[in-house]
Image (cartoon, coloured by chain):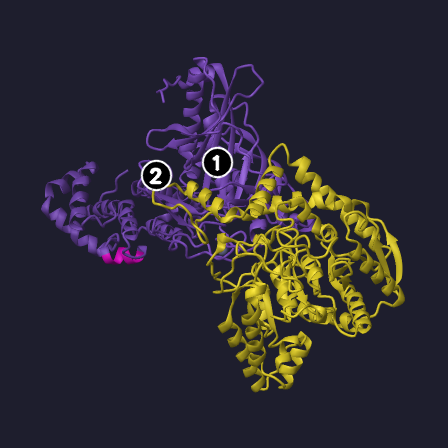
Chain colours: A purple, B yellow
Amino acid sequence: MSVIDLVPYEEALASYDPVMGLEVHVELGTKTKMFCGCATVPGAEPNTQVCPTCLGLPGSLPVVNAIGVESAIRIGLALNCDIAEWCRFARKNYFYPDMPKNFQTSQYDEPIAFNGYLDVELEDGEVFRVEIERAHMEEDTGKSTHVGGATGRIHGAEYSLLDYNRAGIPLIEIVTKPIVGAGDRAPEVARAYVAELRELIRALGVSEARMDMGQMRCDVNLSLMPKGADKFGTRSETKNVNSLRSVERAARFEIQRHAAVLNEGGTIVQETRHFHEDNGTTTSGRIKEEAEDYRYFPEPDLVPVAPAREWVEQLRGELPELPRLRRQRLQSEWGISAVEMQSALNAGAIDLILATIDAGAPADQARKWWLGELARRANEDGVELAELPITPAQVARVSALVAEGKLTDKLARQVIEGVLAGEGGPDEVVAKRGLAVVSDDSALGDAIDAALAAQPDVADKIRSGKFAAAGALVGAVMKATRGQADAARVKELIFEKLGVTPE
Amino acid sequence: MADLIRYTAAETAKAISSGEVSAVEVAQAHLDRINAVDEKVHAFLHVDTDGALEAARAVDAKRAAGEELGPLAGVPLALKDVFTTKGIPTTAGSKMLEGWRPPYDATLTRRLKEAGVVILGKTNMDEFAMGSSTENSAYGPTGNPWDLSRIPGGSGGGSAAALAAYEAPLAIGTDTGGSIRQPGAVTGTVGVKPTYGSVSRYGLIAFSSSLDQGGPCARTVLDAALLHEAIAGYDPMDSTSINAPVPAVVAAARQADVKGMRVGVVKEFGGEGYQAGVMQRFHESVELLRSLGAEIVEISCPSFTYALPAYYLIAPSECSSNLARFDAMRYGLRVGDNGERSAEDVTALTREAGFGPEVKRRIMLGTYALSSGYYDAYYGSAQKVRTLITRDFDRAFGDVDVLISPTTPTTAFPIGERADDPMAMYLADLCTIPSNLAGNAAMSVPCGLAPEDNLPVGLQIIAPALADDRLYRVGAAVEAALNEKWGHSLLEEAPAL
Ligand SMILES: [Zn+2]
């Protein structure tokens, strides 16, 4: 394969309009699988959450998980979709060792939800409407681990291990209509869409939508058409792009690659491509010489799904506030900018901040801790903010201790550190580490007397009106109290003792 | 005691519950019979001697403890090898599953066990229930007890032959296009395809999911009804299972009265291709019903002409998908895994070696019919025909209570005669297929021997969905009248083995 000289991004966008299609798979967080009663606990020993049905044993039959259907409808409603009055499952037939029946129970031309949209907000506050083609229900496959090959793929592997715990876990596939008109902001739109979708899924409580754990997986389809053209070009399909940043990078890379091929008079091959996290490039996967024929037909082992209208309306009435509207409300309540709100969103901090406020902290303090110290720690440790071993209630407690004057900002950071290190709750850490502010005036009085006695010249300067000289005495007191005194109070007490009143 | 094998299921259950005989004695008598004749008949693929005796002992223990026994407790049964039985080999007549011991019981298997039925073993069948002669079994053909050189019908030839050879008083079959009724007809036994969805398919190795239906096989209509009530009923493990009360088929079999019923004769079934002796016995049955007080009406169901081609698109389409799971990965046969070949190659080699020619033919037909560009013309059109056939039935049942026809166009043909002519073989199911496509209920009951070959002829009775009880009313009336006329049941005329 020849190395392509990518066309600079701006240059590519000067000649071409990108057209994108995004396909997102969301693993639902149901307690049982889509078509059997098996558990879905993550990280279980391989092949311990299986039964005749999800192993595809001869004679076994599927039964639809009602919660799976309900979740699909709620997702459809939140995406402003129409909900089918009657729809069926279909079999998608193809052979693959990690698919126990060698067909996937999915939906074909009768999806449960269709014709919707999702408004997404870009960094600068611009709103872009992404239209939704459909959302449909299907089951996940098992998981193959290919051992011994260079690439981790099946070809060239010495042997493969199959874990069917994942087989039959409910998936919702959400497919956009072609996204046109995003121009040079296409990669940003792609990222913002996936981010917004993730927020939506979490707000609905149907999945944690952790991209790093494969609970949400994105395929980026992209093509270019010359500016002014109205016919879409040939697309590439970049599979399993598994972080927000990668979604944006993959789209950007493909724009540059397509432009390079087209500029040289070449043609884009319709193919599957793999994205590489390490260098942000894509490489060719399987070439689709002809469209794969999945021989879809209605699943005869399942009866049609016909959600009653009253039920659908009830679910619509129970939808939570949608994330973007909620963010708008919070932004104005908190009095912050769109950019600040965006960074809270990107950090996954909004719910944590809210919970901290609910636990009694002022909004600015809650934001300060989660977006400052804690965001930095999460970043260092490579974990999600919510995974840090500290609760919103604990953050609120630290904030309260500061407000009460019992902790300085600096001490508070040490308390947080202690909590994160597993030393206990904030009060426990304060006690164990002896971090409380020394505000007992009599205790401070002794330290101040000692400082005045040690530096009589400084005391004289202050008495003569050179108030700034007090800094040296404050420093001495702070040193004596190992930083646990409130510097401002120390200063007050010094002036009081010397009988001066600074302006 | 030698007569134990000739008892009906009803008589056997009564004898056991009254203490006249023990369940173990009954089981042993049938195991002995199997030992004596099955080498010739080859009705069984696997005989579970230990399991049968253990189940029989459990029934005897229950009786000894004074517990109440169900209406079939202790009655032996031959189970078609297409239902899973935990720990007991289940092959579906295929090399693909040779030696497979399922880790779970089919719902039907579980219900039989709960009813105290003694499962003697698993019966021979056309591979994956595809065939009308049991010649497509990977384990060799079954002989028809009336003439061992002839076929016992199919796909459930083993179950029907076990009944006719007195190896078991009850058997289970599955009927996708006639696989219970056609073997019943050619062996002089009773076979019922219940309404689609009334007997759970959980654990029934699928051939064609929208057509497959398990059902009872017996030597008498009453026995079939007793078995019907034991196996039918809602099962949450099968989404297509009907959540409705099972019709009172036992009461209907005891009623055995057709006075005032309107009986429709399907005009389309008869004429060219139908054996003269079959039509003769059929016409006599029509007259018999008239004499018993039924009103006879001729009914036209024009769409039935298209039933066979529609069936041979729908069934293969579904089977091409249902049988995709046999890929050598998790269970069953694995061929060519030498450590060098890819999974894909091993799957291909295994399917090449494990499936017989008829199964391959249908997988290819179905794969083609579902292909993009052909789907509408084949699978789509077949579904439309299916709707038309259902409408023909609806119209007919607006006028009559049941429909009747010959079960099969001919009596049992010689083994090998149609083996190389799939089209001739497919014609055996001409009269039975419409009920599978429409999902209603149908029965085959013996109605005499064809004069030209002295082989059994079956009368097919068809009832609307969920009106299975009508089959038993009519079937039992015909059976009683004919037995009275002959002075014995038809099977008494079968030659000794
Ligand atoms: Zn399972």
Residue A487 lies in what quarter of the image? Answer: top left
Amino acid of disc 1: Val
Q: Nearer the viewer, residue B131 or B305?
A: B131
Discs 2 and 1 share one subunit: yes
The residue at 79%/74% (across/down) is: B487
In this view of the protein, which residue sits in the foreground, B388 or A486? B388
* Magenta-colored segment: predominant secondary structure: helix
Residue that appears at 82% across and 58% down: B280
Gap between marks 2 and 1 measured at Cα: 27 Å
Q: Earlier in the sequence, mark 2 or mark 1?
A: 2
Q: Say what secondary structure mark 2 lies in.
A: loop
Are the residues at dot 2 and dot 1 in contact (C-beta closer than 8 Å)? Answer: no
B423 relative to A20 in the view: left or right:
right
- Residue pointed to by mark 2: A152
Tag 2 subunit: A
The image shows residue A113 at horizontal and vertical percentages of: 61, 41
- From the viewer's perspective, tell me whether residue B481 is left or right of residue B89: right
Q: Which residues are magenta?
A: A427-432
Residue A207 left/right relative to B222? left
Q: In percent of the image, x 66 and y 67: which residue is there?
A: B164
Whether residue A65 is visible: no
